């Protein structure tokens, strides 16, 4: 069997902006964090521009586009405002995610199966602007099939339920959730989709999921920003890259 393709790491800098916004002012700067992450081995940067601008703000997106040397993945809701912003900024990629004002973080995947027409329209506008579109969905056959029908070339599988089960020490639930990811990744790859994964991943879970050959990219944010408090962002990103490399070697 040939060696698996290298696994990319996207670092999400949202929560650098969360800390900045808690006090106001300019520090810490998510753009500087993005530059540090890239220097440490990140293959790209992810930033979620929420409708309420609770962390990343419009100026952050403009500065990221101007300064970083790796692709920017803009997470966004499928609203006319966000589609317009993305078409103007023209990031490398746009990952469409569900969004509720009341949630602390993205709580689940998109209902691609129930929102096909709206998502097809948004994805079409983004693609027409030269932006690679991905849909953030659960590893469920109906959602994966809908993503393919919508025409998005990429999906990102929501790994939150698996990571939550691991954190709770529920081995049976964790095994069941991981098997769902395994099946979903295989189904999506077979449908011609590029497969990414993210949400809640830490060093151990990233190493495990890295062994899935179908997955081309992991997007990780909150955990890395938390670890940066203790060992610096450079060190945290390098440790994550090493964990991913170990996992991929076992694929």
Image (cartoon, rainbow, N blue to C red):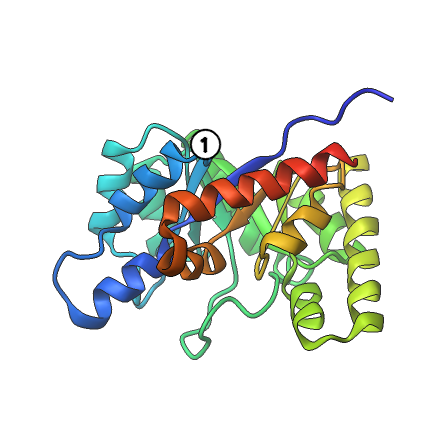
Name the element at disc 1: helix
Quick check: 62 left or right of 231? left
> From the viewer's perspective, is 180 left or right of 66?
right
Q: Is residue 67 left or right of residue 2?
A: left
Point 78% across, 64% down: residue: 177
Instruction: Locate the N terminus and report the quarter of the image it occupies.
Output: top right
| Point 58% across, 49% down: residue | 135
Residue closest to the far front: 231
Q: Decide: is 210 above or below 159.
A: above
Depicted 145 relative to depicted 214: above or below: below
Q: Is residue 215 visible?
A: no
**In the figure, residue 32 lies in which quadrant?**
top left
Frontmost residue, 207 versus 22: 207
Which residue is outermost to the right?
A: 1
Q: Mark 1 sits on what residue?
A: 128
Q: Residue 90 location, x and y as percent?
A: 35, 35
Q: Residue at x 31, y 57 (%)?
A: 16
Q: Residues within 10 Å of mark 1 (few under 14, many from 20)?
A: few
Residue lying at the far bottom of the rendered structure: 102
Residue situated in front as seen by the camera: 166 or 129: 166
Residue 95 position (above or below residue 202): above
Residue 80 x/y as whole percent: 37, 54
Q: Position of residue 108 (x, y in %)?
A: 60, 67
Label total for image: 1
Q: Is residue 233 left or right of residue 242?
A: left
**Quadrant housing the C terminus:** top right
Question: 121 or 131: nearer the eye?
Answer: 131
Q: Position of residue 178 (x, y in %)?
A: 78, 58
Name the residue: 71% across, 71% down: 165
The answer to whether any part of residue 111 appears in the image is: yes
């Amino acid at each position: 069997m040939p060696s698996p393709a290298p696994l990319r790491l996207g670092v999400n800098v949202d929560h650098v902006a969360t800390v900045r916004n808690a006090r106001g002012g300019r520090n810490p700067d998510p753009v500087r964090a993005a530059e540090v992450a890239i220097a440490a081995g990140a293959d790209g940067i992810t930033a979620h521009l929420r409708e309420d601008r609770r962390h990343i703000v419009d100026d952050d997106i403009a500065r990221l586009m101007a300064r970083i040397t790796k692709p920017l993945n803009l997470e966004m809701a499928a609203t006319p405002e966000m589609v317009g912003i993305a078409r103007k900024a023209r990031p490398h990629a746009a990952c469409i995610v569900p969004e509720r004002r009341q949630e602390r973080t993205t709580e689940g995947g998109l209902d691609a199966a129930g929102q096909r027409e709206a998502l097809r329209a948004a994805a079409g506008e983004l693609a027409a602007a030269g932006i690679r579109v991905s849909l953030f969905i659960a590893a469920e056959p109906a959602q994966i099939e809908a993503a393919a029908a919508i025409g998005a070339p990429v999906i990102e599988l929501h790994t939150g339920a698996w990571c939550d089960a691991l954190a709770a020490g529920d081995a049976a639930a964790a095994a069941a959730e991981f098997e769902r990811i395994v099946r979903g990744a295989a189904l999506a790859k077979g449908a011609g989709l590029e497969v990414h994964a993210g949400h809640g991943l830490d060093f151990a879970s990233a190493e495990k999921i890295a062994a899935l050959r179908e997955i081309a990219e992991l997007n990780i944010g909150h955990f890395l920003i938390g670890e940066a408090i203790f060992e610096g962002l450079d060190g945290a990103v390098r440790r994550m890259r090493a964990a991913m490399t170990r996992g991929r070697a076992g694929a």
